[in-house]
Amino acid sequence: MYTISKIAKQFSLKEPELRQYITESGIPVGKSGFISQKYEQMALSLATDIAGPVKLKPETRVEAFLSSDMKIKIFKDDVLSFLSKLPNNSIDIIATDPAYSGMNNKLMLGKGRIVGSYSSKGDSDSKWFTEFVDSEDNYNRFLTECVRVLKKDTGHIYIMFDSYSLLSLGPLLRKYLDVKNIITWDKVNLGMGYYFRRRHEYIVFSTSGNNRKLNSQKFPDVWRIKRIHNAKYPTQKPTEIFQTMLDASARPDMVVCDPFLGSGSCAIAALKAGCKFVGTDISQKAFDISKNRIQHYIENGVDILQRLSGVDNGDA
């Protein structure tokens, strides 16, 4: 729930000036400065415009890790809260793998070979991570924020999907972004599944406009990259997935964002590409693993969670 007072405090603004700006912009303000959920993102965007680049005050700062050169920044925060604090038009590339709940809830998984007991998700000792409740409302809010923070006309965004979430949520992307292609990640080795065993996931590539092309036309729409087995973090993605995204879209010093940080694979790919990076995860385990992984790579040039390349050059 957002109020004028809460937003003013978050962005270090004077409450009377913010109230005037919001009401003059046509946003309804209720009793005690209450702003309905329908207008929350619009009000936050207006506050961002006034405040400029957001710097959280010490009393509201979430747990964070910043590299010494300030090019890498990760936070322990909820995805929507995190995105709401980023300035408009501040991100060149979003590359992310949301922790969808839909597939797992639909299948009502019990004990999985890789991720353990689904019923214990959220427990401190569980192998399951905290998921993003992928309702249509949540996803609309997520995409609204992605569009706001992406650079207008030049932003690129890669969002990963399993087969269930692609069918249930994928169509919403076309309301917000210019969908260019669906990429298939071929994991090479078979996974689990009762009705045909799973060997692939999808990546939807979209843009915030038509003015920036890929760096090259050499990239196919099927990527053969082996899955990570016995990973320290559940569903850890190979760094090469994100490296391929950045090879296609990034240039040095561009700002890359992953709002579902997980094990930090996207951050490592950003470091290798010479990009700046900002990311978040609500899970303390994910934050700690990513922090240690990033810090070790910066200091030693070694990826402690993936020492071998997952790229498969064999014939299909």
Image (tube, grey):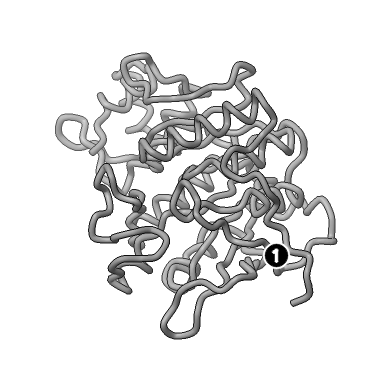
27 sits left or right of 159 in the view: left
Q: Residue shown at 47%/23% (left/top)? A: 54
Q: Position of residue 99 (x, y in %)?
A: 42, 54
Q: Is residue 182 visible?
A: no
Q: Position of residue 135 (x, y in %)?
A: 33, 61
Q: Residue shown at 72%/37% (left/top)? A: 272
Placement of the N terminus among the 4 image quadrants: top left
Q: Residues within 10 Å of mark 1 (few under 14, many from 20)?
A: many
Q: Residue shown at 46%/37% (left/top)? A: 280
Residue at which label 1 appears: 223
Residue 13 location, quadrant: top left
Q: Is residue 29 visible?
A: yes
**Mark 1 residue type:** Trp
Above or below — where is 253 with respect to 59?
A: below
Q: Residue shown at 36%/65% (left/top)? A: 112
* Number of marks present in the image shown: 1
Looking at the image, which is closer to me, 94 or 47? Answer: 94
Q: Position of residue 181 (x, y in %)?
A: 66, 67
Placement of the C terminus among the 4 image quadrants: bottom right
136 sits left or right of 241 in the view: left
